[in-house]
Image: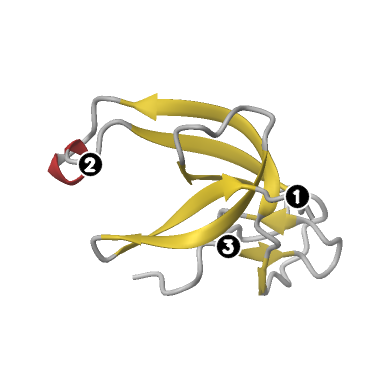
Amino acid sequence: MNTRDPLDLQRCEDCGAWWALRPYACAHCGGTNLPWRRSSGAGEVLARTEIHRAPDAFWRQRVPYVLVLVRLEEGAVLMGHADAGIAIGQQVTGRAITIDGRALLGFEARRPP
């Protein structure tokens, strides 16, 4: 079981690229020094979908729910849950959420500074 925060990503120490999926080597430079680092969680919504037909009983209890793809400021793209009002192009911030004991990634609208 992964006990890392969903905003922990791997960052190539050779070229600075960020990776959401655990790579063997950096696709940018081939470097293999890829320690885990906490990302900012800040990014922009690239895609959004509202799920009405869930894959299993756990999620069927929660329909409809929204999933988004977010390009973080670091460059990595992550999928997570979001409130129904989140739109494509919107600036969001990610955070760890828990639903019935399941650790998930959620995004909420970024608040103005």
Q: Which mark is residue 7?
A: 3
Q: Residue 14, how many percent across, how many down?
A: 85, 67
**Quick one: SS at disc 3?**
loop
How far is the residue under mark 1 from the one under mark 3? 21 Å
Residue drawn at x 54%, y 48% as measured from the top left: 107
Q: Nearer the viewer, residue 47 or 65?
A: 65
Q: Residue at x 66, y 70 (%)?
A: 38
Name the residue: 52% across, 36% down: 68
Task: Say what secondary structure mark 1 lies in.
Answer: loop
Crowd rating for badge 3 (residues with CA inside 10 Å; few <14, some 14–19, many 20+) = many
- In the rendered image, the residue lying farthest to the left is 57
- Above or below: residue 103 compared with residue 72: below
| Residue 26: percent from left, percent from top | 73, 57
Q: Amino acid at mark 2?
A: Trp
Task: For mark 2, give the secondary structure.
Answer: helix
26 shown above or below 38: above
Q: Which disc number belongs to residue 112? A: 1
First-in-chain label (2 vs 3)? 3
Where residue 34 appears, as percent x and y from the top left, is: 69, 69
- Indicate the amino acid at tag 1: Pro
Residue at label 2? 59
Q: Nearer the viewer, residue 15 or 102?
A: 102
Residue 86 relative to residue 84: left or right? right
Residue at the spot 45% in from the left edge and 26% down from the top edge: 49
Name the quadrant of the N terminus: bottom left
Earlier in the chain: of badge 1 and badge 3, it is 3
